[in-house]
Amino acid sequence: MNQRKVFAFIVALIALAALLGSCTKGPATGSCRTAINEKTAMCVDFDMSNPQEDWRMACTKVIKGTWSDARCDTAGALGGCTNTSNRSVVWTFSTGGDYTFDEAKSNCEKQPGSTFILPPGR
């Protein structure tokens, strides 16, 4: 897996979450799961003041993901990338070993205002 593509995708997801988080109309909680390739996936937990319809549209139409009204299932996640400006968490998954824990952590920590976290129970 090309690390630059994964890094660019993480940046795009965080930017999308920040953009949508700036439109405040009411509380929303949900998640969006999307595959980067056959071996790497991401799921974004949204918890911001914004209508769910906006999140759903961005998830399904913009990043071609699958929307859920529940939080991301973090079983098997390498870790999460939290962002203080928009209170989102981008969870990274690797099913083929191509994308590693160290890469996920490093890519997260390169983003201003972002902190790498471990999944619950890990």
Image (cartoon, grey):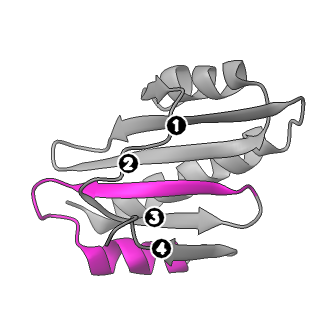
User: Are circles 2 and 3 on residues that touch, CB within 8 Å?
Assistant: no
Q: Earlier in the sequence, mark 3 or mark 4?
A: 3
Q: Earlier in the sequence, mark 2 or mark 1?
A: 1
What secondary structure is found at the residue carrying circle 4? strand
**Left or right, residue 40 beside residue 96:** right
Q: Where residue 46 sits in the image (x, y, percent)?
A: 62, 43
Amino acid at circle 1:
Ser
Task: Determine which residue is flagged by label 2.
Answer: 42
Q: Which mark is residue 80?
A: 3
Marks 3 and 4 in Cβ contact (< 8 Å): yes
Q: Name, please, the residue furthest toward the front.
A: 121
Q: Are marks 1 and 3 in contact (CB under 8 Å)?
A: no
Q: Position of residue 51 (x, y in %)?
A: 77, 25
- Report which residue position mark 4 lands on: 117
- Residue occupying image coordinates x 72% and y 33%: 28
* Residue of label 1: 31
